[in-house]
Image: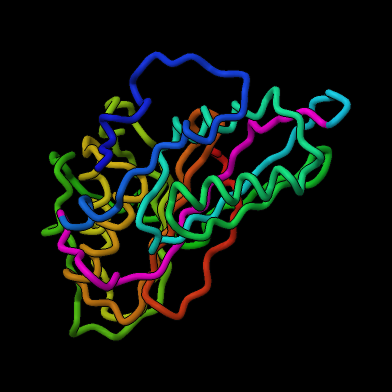
């Protein structure tokens, strides 16, 4: 079984000029899910939305073409793909001749689907043309809620408190203060996070304190979002929950995981100000 420490992360690598799907490095989801008590059927639906801004290939005449790519990896895929390996893989197209964008799309879907062991959605936006739209996560910010905090790892689910005796609410809360660390390199990852739920009111100070307790926590983006989802469900028992994080770009790629209770539509793919 591959582990993150076997990946290209944190290592000096040579960028090849030829198409090479073997560069893709799958990481099984199951071990990290087992750490948070997920086994068997998933308690959520979801998707990981990847936007790649550094994609180029050669047309049959040898002229460079460029595009922005969006990949949608389903949350129930057995594997996720390590992001540096994806960057290396995409760069292997730089000197590859292809008949056109459709040929590229088919090859990307086949290779990424093979690595994730699931069907991966691929959308290409050849340039010039419309790119990924810009916007902000909808919801009420909790970042100015008065709190004191001294715990920045590990995540503190005890901070999550619901008030079942108060009237039921449906609300969407947003924080732009989520930070975690890459589990291999230790480099910081920054994100805006949106938590939409229905049920007993969640204490906002406790929720903010909980999110800030990820500040020195080591996990990949997808794993952080799944941990947040599971902790909120277990501690606050919402009737409906959606957790969506928009992480800032690294290596020309941003990763945006979404996890939710069943029956909800995926969120829009809109770049935030920091992306």
Q: Give the quadrant of residue 43.
A: bottom left
Name the image colouring: rainbow
Which is nearer the eye, 2 or 245?
2
Which is nearer the eye, 119 or 161?
119
Q: Is residue 4 above or below residue 272?
A: above
Which is nearer the eye, 218 or 157?
218
* Residue 34, image x, y percentages: 17, 57
* Residue 50, image x, y percentages: 53, 47
Q: Residue at 82%, 44% (x, y): give it.
A: 129
Q: Residue at 38%, 43% (x, y): give it.
A: 26
Q: Is residue 228 magenta?
A: no
Can residue 242 be seen here? The reply is yes
Q: Residue at 46%, 54% (x, y): give it.
A: 48
Relative placement, left or right, of 110 versus 73 is right
For the N terminus, which image quadrant? top left
Q: Is residue 133 above or below residue 128?
A: below
Q: Is residue 48 magenta?
A: yes
* Residue 274, image x, y percentages: 53, 38
Q: Which residues are magenta?
A: 35-59
* Residue 200, image x, y percentages: 26, 79
Q: Residue at 16%, 40% (x, y): give it.
A: 153
Q: Is residue 236 above or below residue 34?
A: below
Relative placement, left or right, of 246 versus 184 is right
Which is nearer the eye, 168 or 18?
18
């Amino acid at each position: 079984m591959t582990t993150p420490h076997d990946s290209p992360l944190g290592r000096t690598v040579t960028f090849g000029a030829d198409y090479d799907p073997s560069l893709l490095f799958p990481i099984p989801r199951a071990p990290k899910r087992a750490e948070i008590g997920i086994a068997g059927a998933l308690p959520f639906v979801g998707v990981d939305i990847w936007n790649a801004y550094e994609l180029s290939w050669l047309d049959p005449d040898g002229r460079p073409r460029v595009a922005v790519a969006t990949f949608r990896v389903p949350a129930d895929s057995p594997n996720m793909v390590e992001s540096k390996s994806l960057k290396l893989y995409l760069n292997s197209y730089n000197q590859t001749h292809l008949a056109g964008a459709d040929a590229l799309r088919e090859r990307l879907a086949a290779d990424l689907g093979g690595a994730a062991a699931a069907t991966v959605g691929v959308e290409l936006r050849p340039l010039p043309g419309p790119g990924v739209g810009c916007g902000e996560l909808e919801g009420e910010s909790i970042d100015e809620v008065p709190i004191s905090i001294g715990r920045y790892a590990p995540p503190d689910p005890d901070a999550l408190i619901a008030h079942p005796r108060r009237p039921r609410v449906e609300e969407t809360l947003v924080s732009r203060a989520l930070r975690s660390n890459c589990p291999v390199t230790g480099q910081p990852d920054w994100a805006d996070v949106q938590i939409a739920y229905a049920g007993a009111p969640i204490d906002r100070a406790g929720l903010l304190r909980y999110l800030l307790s990820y500040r020195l926590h080591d996990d990949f983006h997808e794993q952080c979002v799944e941990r947040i989802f599971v902790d909120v469900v277990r501690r606050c028992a919402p009737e409906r929950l959606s957790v969506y994080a928009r992480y800032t770009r690294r290596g020309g790629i941003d990763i945006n995981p979404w996890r939710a209770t069943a029956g909800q539509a995926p969120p829009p793919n809109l770049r935030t100000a920091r992306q």
